Amino acid sequence: MKKWLFILVGFSLIGNVFGQKIFKTYFRTYKDTITQKSSTPITKEEFYGFVKNGDTIKNGHYESFYEYSVQKEIIGRYTNDKKDSTFISYYENGNPKWIRSYHNDFLTGEEYFFFNDSTLQKKGIYKTIFVNENTVKSYYSEYNIADQLIAKGLLLNSEMDSLYTQ
């Protein structure tokens, strides 16, 4: 019995892996005016996903890249086309620009912003106070590097609804 259960679970996992594929989008190639050769395509974004009713759905690891560069700009993870993990944005020098957490496409928890040299600039905290199927209200507070409150307010669906400083 255990052997059959293992086989069934194994096939189920294989089906989920094969149901998805890696998608890539590219920056526009250009033609060299001297050699008349086209440039090598450079990846703009790369992600796991699947096609449903003609739409490409992001579902898994996601990466985007700076224009005509191999330097990553943003990494994160999607679940059914919604941001659902920690996302990290990078400066072109490779240092982190910001780190944010998402759940079901809404900002949640702590976020951090950095200067170009990767020193902390400020941090923010999202506390969800109301959730229904299509609406999330959150309380947001922002702190400087000395951990002093510099701004606070309410957000509606991750957008500022009211903001005031202290």
Image: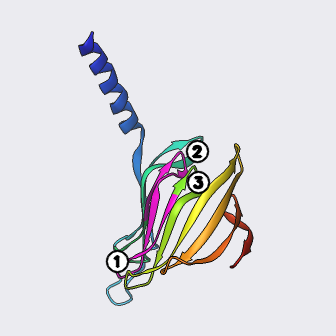
**Earlier sequence position, callout 3 versus callout 2:** 2
| Residue farthest top in this picture | 1
Q: How is the image coloured?
A: rainbow
CA distance separating discs 3 and 2: 22 Å
Residue behind mark 1: 94
Q: Amino acid at mark 3?
A: Asp
Give how far across and how far down residue 49 sits, in percent.
46, 47
First in sequence: mark 3 vs mark 1: 1
* 3 or 2: mark nearer the eye: 3
Give the label on residue 105, or none. Answer: 3
Query: What range of the chain is rendered magenta?
Result: 75-101
Tell me if mark 2 has few (under 14), some (14-19) or many (20+) residues whose alpha carbon lies within 10 angstroms of its own: few
Sooner in the amino-acid sequence: mark 1 or mark 2: 2
Can residue 150 be seen at all in this image of the molecule? yes
Q: What amino acid is found at the position of numbered circle 2 in the picture?
A: Gly
The residue at 46%/62% (across/down) is 87
In the picture of the structure, the residue carrying the numbered disc 2 is 54
Mark 3 lies on a secondary structure that is loop
What secondary structure characterizes most of the magenta part? strand
